[in-house]
Amino acid sequence: MRGSEPGTGPPRAAAAGRRLRARLPRVLTLSLTVAAVVSAAAGVGAAALASRRGSVGSRTVLAAGGAAAAVGVLAAAALVVRSGAFALFGLVHLAYLGLTVTVPLLAVGLAVLAVAAVRGGRAAPPKALWAVVVLGLVPAPVGAYATHVEPGRLRVDHHVVAVDPERAGDDEVRIAVLADLQTNRVGDHERRAVDEVLAAEPDVILLPGDLFQGSDGELEALQDDLRALLGRLEAPHGVFFVRGDVDGGDQGHAARVLEGTGIEVLVDEVAEVPVGDRVLRIGGTALAYDSEAADAVRTDLQGTPTDGAVTILLSHRPDTVLALPESSRVDLTVAGHTHGGQVVLPVVGPLLTFTDVPRAVARGGLHRIDGNPIYVSPGVGLEREQAPQVRFLSRPAVGILTLRDAA
């Protein structure tokens, strides 16, 4: 083993570790894509061998091709698990590439074999084989849309939140919600999200966490642009932020990005803001929504006099609403985290939500849980690093909420 110079070993090792962690997402994507293509090639090869054995039926051809492809995908999955470097999202990424790359390529290969058989004077393949080929091709355009189109199809959600007449006041209050920017770049999509928020001319802007997701090196290169982008967020009565899963603590990514922007970070505390003819009490909780400190924020909001301020509970995770009593004094809970499921299937709904609130609530929008209004933002960005960077039937969104008299 070759040693290192005194005093340089640990820093060099740490730097190498940072570079490796920064490259892991790219290495993962490349490795799994190669695995998907190789699996498809193995499947086509197995199908070709089966088809050359005399009068072997189409079922045997399909079985041979599918089995070879499945073995390839399972082998890649085993390597992912055994490496210890990739977690759940790595397996999800593998499954996604298997569906959108391996299966369509295998379908193309089977179609080529079928056409070659006909041209070679052999019997025409049955219609069932062509049906399988057509079905196998479908995931390719769906995957292309989910990867390259829908993540950029930003929409603006408008909702009216009814407030008890005793504290509604005469003036409407407009609140903009920009959640889960969760980016590692500043492009047209991120700039448009901020533009849409500012175009609504909100009284208050709420940011329920997850601003940046990437390596320290990526943040160092991006932080000036990201800080300039977020620095544009201004509202007459303030911009408030609570930390999410990827934001870190006091010295984390979010702290570096928000420095000098004027955005107020709420960590298990309540801010009082005069807006028009009433007062907003905004309680922001840290990521641990079930902690004693977070519970103290909820208790504080519920103790607000009934004829006093409008109360808003701001949290990254929507689960905080489950800790409220039925029809509580909290007028509105605002959260993000779920990305609307990020991948939603017809009838089935969101595949993953990572929350205990009902799936329909996690899907996003304005809902009620035990009489408590909650707005869950579908978010602007998406899960990065090991995860497949896709959205399907879950468009990114910013929210514009108008508080007015329930009457």
Image (tube, rainbow, N blue to C red):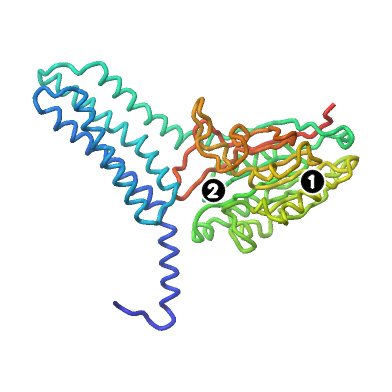
State the image coordinates of residue 11 (x, y, percent, origin top left). Answer: 45, 74
Question: Picture quarter containing residue 401?
Answer: top right
Q: Is residue 10 visible?
A: yes
Label 2: few (<14), some (14–19) or many (≥20) C-alpha neighbours in 10 Å: some
Question: Picture quarter containing residue 46?
Answer: top left
Residue 407: mark: none
Label 1: few (<14), some (14–19) or many (≥20) C-alpha neighbours in 10 Å: few
Residues under labels 2 and 1: Cα distance? Answer: 27 Å
Identify the mark nearer the N-term, 2 or 1: 2
State the image coordinates of residue 147 (x, y, percent, origin top left). Answer: 45, 37
Q: Is residue 153 above or below residue 13?
A: above
* Viewer-proximal residue among 14 and 257: 14
Q: Which residue is mark 2?
A: 183
Q: Is residue 262 visible?
A: no
Q: Which residue is mark 1?
A: 236
Task: Please report the residue visible at 77 percent of the width from the left and 43 percent of the height from the top.
Answer: 312
Task: Please report the residue visible at 67 percent of the width from the left and 51 percent of the height from the top.
Answer: 290
Amino acid carrying label 1: it is Pro
Amino acid carrying label 2: it is Thr
Is disc 1 placed on a helix, strand or loop? loop
Please give left or right for residue 350 compared with residue 47 in the image: right
* Viewer-proximal residue among 85 and 114: 85
